[in-house]
Amino acid sequence: MSIRRWVAAAVTAGFAILVAEAIAHHSSAPFYNPENRVEFEGTVTRWVFRNPHAFLFVNVAGGNDEVIEWQVELGAPVSIRRAGWSPDTLQVGQRVKVSGQRSRAEGSYGVCCVRMTKPDGSPIIEGGRVEEAPARR
Amino acid sequence: MNPVLKGKITILAVVALAVGYANPQISSQSIETDIPIFDGIWNGGFSVRPVNGENVPWGENNFPVLNERALAYQEVWEEIMAPKYDCQPASSPAIQYDPYHMKVTQWPDRVLLRYEKDDQLRTVWLDGRKPKSTDFGVQGFSVGHYENGSLYVTTTHFVFDVAGFDDYNGIPSSSQKKVTERYWLEEGELRMTLTIEDSMFLREPTSYTTRWLPAREGYQLQAYDCDPEAARASVRFYPSKYK
């Protein structure tokens, strides 16, 4: 197998694992719209590392001096712990860049199935993955 | 009665009782029965089988035929009605297909199925006992036996569950739900065929077959400790049709 194929296979496998982790408890489709993607950079205010899904809360500066709190849904800690995530992975005050599928309820600020990095684009966990593939419909 | 004979009978009775207490797991099955060894931790995760969803494991070929009552429930169903958003654990036939590990412990009189998902423990009784009227529960009451290298399990006495068929299709299950499972070893895998019947909602029984692989060396089940706040956190993102 060529190096390109090995890389493609590894990336595919990594994505598949992340997708599965994201939906192990419930499907993302009823809550998040894959056609409505958002991207933001903000400051971590809370990191909830508990089953069935880990959640990250991020304050993002909006217009008119308002601050919007986004709720970022991640996989089940029982699963993502195996990939190196822990309650200490993220700290309050840390800056992160997030892009993903926006929540469906009107006026809500949720996002799932995310690509998340440090502001410089590097992985949150050294050597770790940064992106979740599109969620199942 | 002869006092000597009476004394011997008393001693024998005491010895018999003592043996009974010392071996509380005496099985109802003879030791000649072909008992497969399932003991250990099994991986049912993402790398082992397709992840559960709207069409897995219930797809085109085995999706249940619903009666009008079930269809009416589906009509009013919304995802956020599922009690899992309050940490109610998954039950049969869904928990077997959740993408997590499972630990099997075989004792002579029972088999213990410990699921990493939702910290659930099912006990399959092999000693011939029958469920009592008070044995209803989320996981029901399971009895089983070994036969020709397989473990056969029958579970009844489930409580009503508005999402008791699976996690994705809004199909409830009733106290009439009956789940039968056959476990066997093949090519180093633990395989299972599960059949569900529930005359309250399904017109006929339906089945799926799945597998687990041995967990990696040294793997231990993690506590799930479902957190009510985390379980409910995404509910507010659901655009409900009810106001």
Image (cartoon, coloured by chain):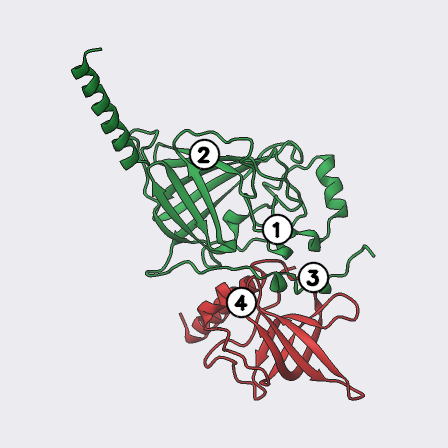
Chain colours: A red, B green
Helix, strand or loop at mark 2: strand
- Give, as a three-letter code, the residue at label 3: Val
Q: Which residue is drawn at the image coordinates 41% and 44% (left, top)?
A: B112
Q: Which residue does the numbered mark 3 point to in the structure image?
A: B235
User: Disc 1 or disc 2, which is closer to the eye?
Assistant: 2
Q: Which residue does the numbered mark 4 point to in the structure image?
A: A18
Q: Is residue B212 above or below residue A23?
A: above
Q: Is residue A3 above or below residue B188?
A: below
Q: Are marks 3 and 4 on the same chain?
A: no
The percent coordinates of residue B164 (x first, y second) are 62, 44
Q: Which residue does the numbered mark 1 point to in the structure image?
A: B167
Q: Which residue is drawn at the image coordinates 61% and 58% (left, top)?
A: A26
Q: Which residue is drawn at the image coordinates 70% and 59% (left, top)?
A: A30
The percent coordinates of residue B25 (x first, y second) are 33, 36
Helix, strand or loop at mark 1: loop
In space, the residues marked 3 and 2 are separated at their CA atoms by: 37 Å
- Give, as a three-letter code, the residue at label 4: Leu
Farthest residue in the right direction?
B243
Q: Chain of mark 2?
A: B
Q: Earlier in the sequence, mark 3 or mark 1?
A: 1
Residue A75: quadrant of the picture: bottom right
Circles 1 and 2: CB distance less than 8 Å?
A: no
Q: Residues within 10 Å of mark 1 (few under 14, many from 20)?
A: many
In space, the residues marked 3 and 1 are separated at their CA atoms by: 15 Å
Q: Chain of mark 4?
A: A
* Nearer-the-camera pick, A85 or B231: B231
Circles 3 and 2: CB distance less than 8 Å?
A: no
Q: Which mark is residue B143?
A: 2
* The N terminus of chain B - image quarter: top left
